[in-house]
Image: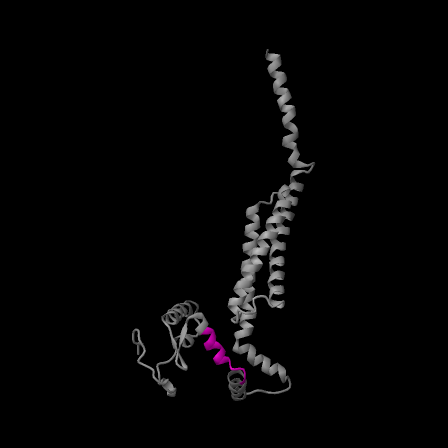
Amino acid sequence: MPTHVCASSGSATSEAEPLSSAPALGLSRPERALRTALAHAALYLGAPAFGFLIFVLAFRIGAFRGVDILFYRGLVLMGFSAALTLAAATFLAGRLGFAGIRRRDAVSAAVLSLSLNLSFFVLSPVTIDRSVSVFILGEMAAHPGADYSADHMRSAFKDVYVDEYRQIERRMAEQEASGNVERIGGAYRITAQGRAFIRASGWIAWLFDTDRRLVDGRSSGEGGRPTPPGSAAPDGPARAE
């Protein structure tokens, strides 16, 4: 009887050995660690590259061109590219399961791709589309041999950026679409949402020490600026003198 038990134990042990050695596939521990590291690198480098490529191609082929505001269109296309990236990363994770890649790694890689696309989009295309500094440099680059004074550039800004390109009208239309202003007859008035946005922007300006004049504005008629027709006294707390 004891012999039978030992034989059974030996048989069970010999049957279990291939299972314990199967994951190794003849690789040493350092080799398995290297394989896992390379698989993770392929996933976490490949997913952002794939997501960025889809994001750029979607812009180039004119996807969702009906969304007039660049930032909103970018958000839609980022969601689209993130969904495709997640699908591709999940497929890749299934293929690389032998190297320790899990489906949660696919989700992490897709989130990384989305985050990098958002950072690039805000720092580059949106800045180029809306920056006064980019307009100034563009004007100077168009005439590389010319010297510009501040007065000359101020005049060019008004004549080209404001009047010819009608950027004020574009910005007002964008703010109306965003809900920050509303059209009253032939004019615009800031909404409660717009005032809330400015209050939040004021806190951000204070936290990061940006130019508060751009969010504080000036009281109607202050500094020689004409009072808008039909304007009322500003609501909210009075400014500290």
Along the line of sight, which residue is nearer the eye, 147 or 135?
Answer: 135
Residue depicted at x 58% and y 59%: 81
In the image, farthest residue toward the right: 26
Considering the whole magenta stretch, tell me its main secondary structure: helix
Q: Position of residue 177 (x, y in %)?
A: 45, 72
Query: Which quarter of the rendered picture does the C terminus lie within?
Result: bottom left
Is 240 located above or below residue 78 in the figure? below
Number of dots carrying numbers? 0
Residue depicted at x 51% and y 80%: 167
Magenta segment boundaries in residue numbering: 164-175
Is 231 located above or below residue 200 in the figure? below
Q: Does 92 appear in magenta?
A: no
Quarter occupied by residue 82:
bottom right
Along the line of sight, which residue is nearer the eye, 223 or 107?
Answer: 107
Q: Position of residue 178 (x, y in %)?
A: 44, 70
In the image, farthest residue toward the top: 1
Q: Position of residue 117 (x, y in %)?
A: 56, 62
Residue depicted at x 56% and y 79%: 135
Quarter occupied by residue 182:
bottom left
Q: Does 169 appear in magenta?
A: yes
Along the line of sight, which residue is nearer the eye, 85 or 49?
Answer: 85
Query: Which quarter of the rendered picture does the N terminus lie within?
Result: top right
Along the line of sight, which residue is nearer the eye, 45 or 206?
Answer: 45
